[in-house]
Image (cartoon, grey):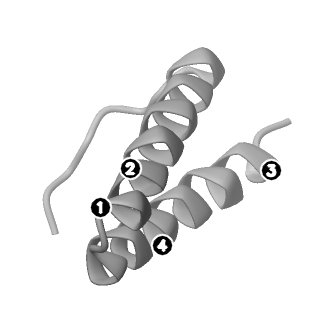
Amino acid sequence: MALRQPLSINDIRSAIRELSARADLARKEGRPEDAAELEQRIRGYREELTARP
């Protein structure tokens, strides 16, 4: 796993919005596996966001 820079709260929120839009598009295009992977990433970002003070 690669090391990554800590993200700001705004960066996390932006990533969640972008990934949510991509997941919606994947579902509309009939790509449920891609949508599921994106949803998994979204969950990770939401967990990171809730862990912040």
Q: Secondary structure at mark 3?
A: helix
Q: Residues within 10 Å of mark 4 (few under 14, many from 20)?
A: few
Return the residue at label 4: 40
Given the image, on which type of amino acid does mark 4 rest? Gln
Look at 13% across and 58% down and name the residue there. Answer: 2
Per the image, the residue denoted by label 3 is: 50
In this rendering, which labeled residue sits more in front, label 3 or label 4?
4
Q: Please say if the residues under marks 1 and 4 sit with CB atoms less than 8 Å apart.
A: no
Q: Which label belongs to residue 29?
A: 1
Q: Residues within 10 Å of mark 2 (few under 14, many from 20)?
A: some
Quick one: label 3 or label 1, which is nearer the N terminus?
1
The residue closer to the viewer here, 34 or 27, is: 27
State if disc 2 and disc 1 touch (CB < 8 Å).
Answer: yes
Q: Is residue 25 left or right of residue 51?
A: left
Whole-angstrom CA distance, mark 3 to mark 4, is 15 Å
Q: Secondary structure at mark 4?
A: helix
In the image, is residue 35 above or below residue 36? above
Most foreground residue, 52 or 15: 15
Disc 3 to disc 1, C-alpha distance: 31 Å
Number of other residues with Cα within 10 Å of mark 1, as a class: few under 14, some 14 to 19, many 20 or more = few
- 10 Å neighbourhood of mark 3: few (<14), some, or many (≥20)? few
The numbered mark, 2 or 3, whose residue comes first in the sequence reads 2
Type of the residue with mark 2? Leu
Pointers 2 and 3 in contact (CB under 8 A)? no
Q: Is residue 51 above or below residue 34?
A: above
Q: Is residue 3 left or right of residue 53?
A: left
Q: Tell me the mark number nearer the camera, choosing from 3 and 1.
A: 1
Q: Earlier in the sequence, mark 3 or mark 4?
A: 4
- Residue 27, given in percent of the width and then of the height, sits at 42, 66
Q: Earlier in the sequence, mark 2 or mark 4?
A: 2
Determine which of the numbered discs, if any, sits on residue 1 in the image: none
